[in-house]
Structure formats: structure tokens, C-alpha cells
Amino acid sequence: MQREIFCGNTVIDGDERILLEYFIIPKYIHEEYCNLWQYGVKVKKTVIKNGGTNISETKEISNIFYDEAEAKRFVQLIMKNRVTPVTLMDVVEDYIISAV
């Protein structure tokens, strides 16, 4: 599985557009007695000003999930709530704590 983009949300705020992109980052783990996939999440925020200036910030957290379906549900949740790179770690922590 390659890096998978789910979707981008575009928000118009005054004279700028804010593009939020959400990715699932798969990683295959192969050890002597173990073959499995782990899934991380990446959020990229790009602010596009009217003058053409782009400002980007990105946050990636690896190896959060072992289940692809759960990773997809999580990305749909953060997309719906327009989570940004700045708040991604807090949202991941809250999600994991609520799942335990």
C-alpha cells in the first residue's frame, strides 16, 4: 500500500485559502517471526494567500494503528473535525485513551 490521501478540505478565510490534506502512512514490518502492517497519519496544512504566497506545515505520527480500517475511520474523524498539524498529537492521544 502506498501513501494514501483521503481528501483535502479547503476553507476560505478572508483573503486566504487553507487547504488541509490527510494521509494514511503504511509501514510493513518484517521480522523473523512477525509480518504485519502498521499505519500512521499525516496532516498537511497549506495557507494560500491572495498574492500567491504559500505557507505549509506538516505533522506525521507513525505506527499508531495495526488495523487499516481503524486508521481510515480515524482519518475520516479528523477530516470531519478539520484537525490541523498543531493539534494532531493531542487528538491522537485522546483517541487512543478513549479506545483503551
Image (cartoon, rainbow, N blue to C red):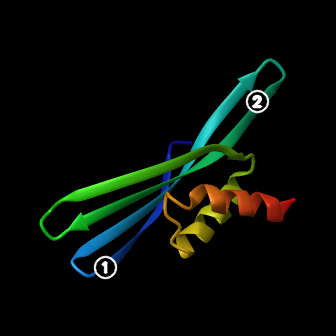
5 versus 66 height, above or below: below
Would residue 24 be found to the left or right of residue 51 on screen? right
Image point 62% across, 47% down: which residue?
A: 40
Q: Residue at x 23, y 58 (%)?
A: 54
Please state which of residues 88 and 26 is positioned toward the viewer in this rendering.
88
The residue that label 2 is drawn on is 35
Image coordinates for residue 81, horizontal then vertical, percent: 56, 75
> In front of the other: label 1 or label 2?
1
Residues packed near mark 1 inside 10 Å, few (<14), some (14 to 19) or many (20 plus): few
Near mark 2 (Cα within 10 A), the count class, few <14, some 14-19 or many ≥20, is few
Q: Secondary structure at mark 2?
A: strand
In the rendered structure, the answer to whether residue 60 lies left or right of residue 71 reads left
Front-lying residue, 33 or 75: 75
Sequence-wise first label, 1 or 2: 1
- Mark 1 — residue? 12
Tell me the kind of residue under disc 2: Asn
* Badge 1 amino acid: Ile
Expressed as whole percent of the image width and height from the top left, the position of residue 85 reads 49, 57
Measured along the vertical axis of the image, is residue 40 above or below residue 82? above
